[in-house]
Image (cartoon, rainbow, N blue to C red):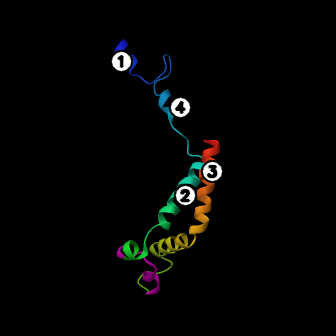
């Protein structure tokens, strides 16, 4: 019918589902690097006293011996702490990503 074809996103004569396959964006190395950068940004802004200590993810959990440094939780605490110390390189990387997005779209 004419009404159902008007609402279909597929081109006339195209295989069913062809429009869905072409409209999705592929996960490239660039988008993966951007997602990792966004994750590190999220870790960098977490407040130690207001949030991390309440969740048991503060540096004091490692130093007090409450969490082992080799456990997955200890590794996460180390990653969060390292990310918080690396704020200046994160600012530089963010500026680089913004510049590239402005130039290349």
* Label 4, label 1: how far apart the Cα atoms are: 21 Å
Which numbered circle lies on residue 22? 4
Question: How far across and how far down the image is residue 3, in percent?
Answer: 35, 15
Tell me the SS state at disc 1: helix
Secondary structure that dominates the magenta span: helix
Question: How far across and how far down the image is residue 78, in percent?
Answer: 51, 75
Residue on which the image places disc 3: 99
Tell me the SS state at disc 4: helix
Which mark is first along the chain, 3 or 4? 4
Q: In this view, does 46 lie above or below 63?
A: above
Mark 1 Cα within 10 Å, few/some/many (few <14, many 20+)? few
* Label 1, label 3: how far apart the Cα atoms are: 44 Å
Residue closer to the observer: 72 or 88 = 88
Classify residue 23 as left or right of residue 96.
Answer: left
The answer to the question of whether label 4 and label 1 lie on touching residues, with beta carbons closer than 8 A, is no
Which mark is first along the chain, 1 or 4? 1
Residue on which the image places disc 1: 4
Residue on which the image places disc 2: 36
Tell me the SS state at disc 3: helix
């Amino acid at each position: 019918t004419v009404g159902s074809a008007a609402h279909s996103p597929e081109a006339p004569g195209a295989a069913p589902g062809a429009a869905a396959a072409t409209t999705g964006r592929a996960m490239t190395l660039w988008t993966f690097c951007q997602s990792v950068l966004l994750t590190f940004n999220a870790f960098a802004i977490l407040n130690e006293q207001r949030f991390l200590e309440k969740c048991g993810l503060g540096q004091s959990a490692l130093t007090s011996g409450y969490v082992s440094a080799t456990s997955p939780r200890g590794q996460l605490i180390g990653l969060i702490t390292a990310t918080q110390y690396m704020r200046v390189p994160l600012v530089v990387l963010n500026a680089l990503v913004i510049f590239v997005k402005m130039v290349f779209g």
